[in-house]
Amino acid sequence: QVQLVESGGGLVQAGGSLRLSCAASGRTFSGYAMGWFRQAPGKEREFVAAISWSGSSTGYADSVTGRFTISRDNAKNTVYLQMNTLKPEDTAVYYCAVRAYSSSWSRAIRDYDYWGQGTQVTVSS
């Protein structure tokens, strides 16, 4: 089992920044790809960003490309999402996820095996 705990969410004005963190514990944090997803009220959960185990490969949703940056520190078992130039449409609950059986990232929700409880991000206009 892998336990994931997100932090860093909050209320920010449009144009501001937040940095989300996701700390993993439980099974050895090794060889896992990680991803961030979000779900806004009344909408389906959607892909935001993901990173390979080595950190050498990343992927982003078109809506956040150029504004968000995903990174990881395997020594700390932590993945980060730096969010800049935030917009009201970025308001959502943000979830981190582990792709436990692959070191390569994916955009597909079904490819992730463990999920955190989520952290709320609210961007005011």
Image: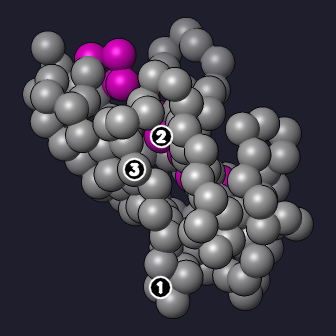
Q: Which mark is residue 109?
A: none
The amino acid sitting under disc 1 is Lys
- The dot on residue 76 is 1
For the residues labelled 2 and 3, the Cα–Cα distance comes to 14 Å
- The amino acid at mark 2 is Tyr
Query: Residue 4: percent from the left, percent from the top?
Result: 58, 65
Judge from the rendering whether residue 83 lies leftward or rightward of residue 25; answer left or right. left
How is the model colour-coded? one colour
Magenta range: 88-98
What residue appears at the point 72 percent right and 38 percent down from the top-left corner? 107
Residue under label 3, please give it: 69
Camera-nearest residue between 118 and 74:
74
Query: Which residue is at the far top?
Result: 42
Please tell me in which quadrant of the rendered image residue 55 appears.
Answer: bottom right
Q: Secondary structure at mark 3?
A: strand
Q: Amino acid at mark 3?
A: Thr
Secondary structure of the residue carrying numbered label 1? helix
Q: Residue at (55%, 30%) from the top-left corner? A: 61
Compare marks 1 and 2 and give the one earlier in the sequence.
1
Mark 1 or 2: the one toward you: 1
Q: Look at the image and tell me whether residue 112 can be seen.
A: yes
Asked if residue 5 is among those painted magenta in the image, a careful observer would answer no
Residue under label 2, please give it: 94
